Image (tube, rainbow, N blue to C red):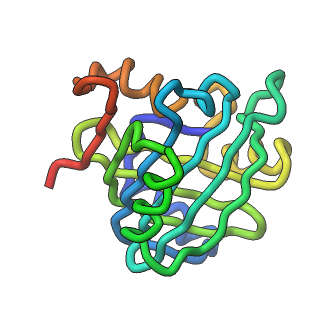
Amino acid sequence: IKILNINKKEIIQKLDRLGARKIFDDYLITEIYDTKDSMLEHKKILLRLRKEGQKAVLGFKARVKQESKAKIREEVETMVDNFENMKLILSKIGFIEKRSSKKLRTSYILGKVRFDIDSYGIIPDLLEIEAPTEKEVEEAVKLLGYSMGDANKESYNDLIKRYNIKTQNDKRTFHMQI
């Protein structure tokens, strides 16, 4: 789930007090790929190439469960040696970049729960909470002083619409202002 419009400093202080361990604090470049006719999007599948600091990760996500307070997805990821070469491979096998984003991400782990604080610069900071079970997500939300009523399941596309982000042609880009 996501919690929108957070106070990043307060969330970090709460996570530190809870004993969460910071595992990442750097820029993320994310590119989403699909076929020209958006076959993957129609099947609710996401093919993502992400540069996380100096690492590159290729990922697959597919929606699993609809009726839930949290967004449940199957997710498979693998490390790739070279971000640019992977982009080229995807292009050579017929995939096109449909959208891209750049953001500053600060990530923490507490037990089995992951907390990602994302700063784009053009929208308010947001917090994403992921855990193995919906119950663990709900508990983590409460630990930070929120309720599931504050939780949001909006997709990337929904956030573009919510904040009236301008897009160019069919390629949707959402970059942090530096």
Number of marks in the image? 0
In the rendered image, which quarter is residue 161 located in? top left
Give the residue displayed 75% in from the left and 47% down from the top: 137
Q: Point out residue 155 in the picture as x, y percentages from the top left corner.
A: 54, 30
Of all residues, the one furthest to the left in this rendering is 178
- 20 and 56: which one is in front? 56
Q: Residue 145, relative to residue 29: is it above or below?
A: above
Give the residue displayed 48% in from the left and 62% down from the top: 89
Q: Residue 86, relative to residue 126: is it above or below?
A: below
Q: Residue 52, relative to residue 31: is it above or below?
A: below
Residue 85 visible: yes
- 133 and 76: which one is in front? 76
Q: Point out residue 29 in the picture as x, y percentages from the top left corner.
A: 37, 58
In the rendered image, which quarter is residue 174 located in? top left
- 81 and 14: which one is in front? 81
Q: Give the left or right position of residue 72, taking residue 42 as reference.
A: right
Q: Which quadrant holds the C terminus?
A: bottom left
In the rendered image, which quarter is residue 69 located in? top right
Give the residue displayed 73% in from the left and 58% down from the top: 76
Q: Give the left or right position of residue 62, taking residue 38 as reference.
A: right
Give the residue displayed 59% in from the left and 74% down from the top: 79
Residue 151 visible: no
Q: Point out residue 87 in the picture as x, y percentages from the top left corner.
A: 42, 60
Q: Which quadrant holds the N terminus?
A: top right
Q: Point out residue 95 in the picture as x, y percentages from the top left corner.
A: 49, 45
